């Protein structure tokens, strides 16, 4: 509707929607502003994930690896598989190059986002930690004398997150899973709502427990997901090795 007509308005001469150009410009800016942090600290990032800097007494509710697993759980599948397939089907093989390029410089934007999240996170009386864009947008801009703008952007972020979770996180992924499982369990052909109830119950068991339970489940499931993903990619590449030069072409 109205939001899509603005965010996906094609910029004359560039041939890309304004939302893509905005993300690309931001990623380039942060890459330069942070002195190529996406390359400069890549080794350090691996060490953090491996647990070199883990401190059991440090403030926070999850480990570095659990935080990474929780983040990856939303990208392996919807982003890496469905997103890439749609991009290549829509834009052709050349889309792969641009996804790799934007992914590399997008690491700088992600670094900035996560760092701001750490800087402006808040600790509640019960010991739980709250953070995210809604906090650093409102608090950070308030510090710069733009309290009103910060509140507007924080509220807009939350509303868009809810919309994204309903569309991508729920509707799309559950529908894709249902289509796959129908062949194994024909009962869902006649009662798709039953599968929806099962998913609601299973997901509810995880998310109602808060970030600790989400991270605990993610750090067990996500490594297996990533391993399956990498193995599947290697199998496809090996099975179609003869087509690789043409793909680069």
Image: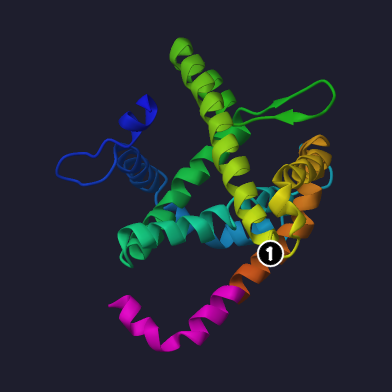
Q: Please name whichever residue, 226 or 203, is drawn nearer the observer in this view of the structure.
A: 203
- Write down the region rendered in magenta: 232-249
Q: Residues within 10 Å of mark 1 (few under 14, many from 20)?
A: few
SS state under label 1: loop
Q: Is residue 163 left or right of residue 6?
A: right
Q: Is residue 201 left or right of residue 190?
A: right
Quarter location, residue 61: top right
Residue 24: x and y in percent read: 34, 45
Question: Can residue 108 be seen by looking at this rendering?
Answer: yes
Q: Please name whichever residue, 185 or 79, is drawn nearer the observer in this view of the structure.
A: 185
Q: Is residue 67 left or right of residue 95?
A: right
The residue at which mark 1 appears reads as 183
What's the residue at 80%, 42% (across, down)?
Answer: 206
What's the residue at 40%, 89% (across, down)?
Answer: 242
Quadrant, the N terminus: top left
Residue 136: x and y in percent read: 55, 26
Residue 131: x and y in percent read: 65, 30
> Compared with residue 81, is residue 120 higher up or lower down, i.e. above or below?
above
């Amino acid at each position: 509707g109205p939001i899509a007509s603005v965010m996906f308005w094609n910029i004359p001469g560039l041939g890309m929607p304004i939302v893509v150009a905005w993300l690309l410009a931001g990623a380039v800016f942060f890459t330069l502003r942070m002195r190529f942090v996406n390359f400069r600290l890549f080794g350090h990032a691996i060490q953090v994930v491996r647990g070199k800097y883990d401190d059991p007494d440090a403030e926070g509710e999850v480990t570095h690896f659990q935080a990474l697993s929780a983040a990856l759980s939303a990208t392996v599948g919807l982003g890496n598989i469905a997103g890439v397939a749609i991009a290549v089907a829509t834009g052709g093989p050349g889309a792969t190059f641009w996804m790799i390029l934007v992914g590399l410089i997008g690491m700088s934007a992600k670094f900035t986002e996560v760092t701001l999240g750490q800087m402006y996170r808040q600790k509640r009386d019960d010991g739980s930690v709250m953070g995210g864009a809604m906090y650093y947008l409102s608090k950070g801009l308030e510090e710069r004398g733009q309290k009103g703008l910060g509140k507007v952007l924080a509220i807009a972020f939350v509303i868009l997150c809810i919309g994204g979770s309903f569309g991508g996180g729920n509707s799309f992924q559950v529908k894709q899973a249902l289509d796959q499982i129908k062949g194994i369990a024909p009962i869902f052909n006649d009662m798709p709502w039953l599968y929806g109830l099962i998913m609601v119950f299973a997901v509810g068991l995880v998310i109602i427990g808060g970030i600790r339970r989400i991270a605990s489940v993610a750090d067990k499931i996500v490594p297996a997901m990533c391993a399956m993903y990498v193995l599947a990619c290697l199998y496809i590449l090996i099975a179609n090795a003869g087509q690789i030069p043409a793909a680069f072409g």
